[in-house]
Amino acid sequence: MSIIWFIVVGLVAGLLARALMPGRQSMGLVATLLLGIVGSFVGGFIGSLFSPSRRVFDLQPSGIIMSVVGAIVVLLLVGWAGRGRRIHA
């Protein structure tokens, strides 16, 4: 049951991150789900930086708030990396 819960939290985190992020992100449901899952791991990493009881390099899923924060960070990084790839006509 934990895998299903992880997928649901990832989807909700991805949807919330896309809703909170200004601009248009053209991605489907699967990409939004993957964004939320990656955001969960990034949020867990960010949370472990501020928690003395966690080790930084332990990959662990985080709660919904840190998952959304992590997904926003991932969206910012993808947007920043994709800026130079635009073709100017």
Image (spheres, rainbow, N blue to C red):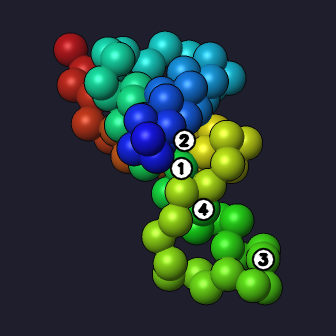
What residue type is disc 1 on? Answer: Ser
Question: Relative to the observer, which residue lies in front, 31 or 83?
Answer: 31
Question: Relative to the observer, which residue lies in front, 89 or 77?
Answer: 77
The residue singled out by tag 3 in the image is 51
Mark 4 residue crowding within 10 angstroms, few (<14) / some (14–19) / many (20+): many
Tell me whether the residue at label 1 lies in contact with that at label 3, contact meaning CB atoms closer than 8 angstroms. no
The residue singled out by tag 2 in the image is 71
Query: What separation in Å lies between label 2 and label 4 (alpha carbons)?
Result: 11 Å
What residue type is disc 3 on? Answer: Ser
Locate residue 89, reporting x and y percent.
Answer: 21, 14
| Mark 2 or 1: the one toward you | 1
Residue drawn at (67%, 81%) of the image: 54
| Mark 2 or 3: the one toward you | 3
Please tell me which of labels 2 and 3 falls first in the chain: 3
Locate residue 30, reporting x and y percent.
Answer: 30, 24
Tell me whether the residue at label 2 lies in contact with that at label 1, contact meaning CB atoms closer than 8 angstroms. yes
What residue type is disc 2 on? Answer: Ala
Tell me whether the residue at label 4 lies in contact with that at label 1, contact meaning CB atoms closer than 8 angstroms. yes
Please tell me which of labels 2 and 4 falls first in the chain: 4
The residue singled out by tag 4 in the image is 44
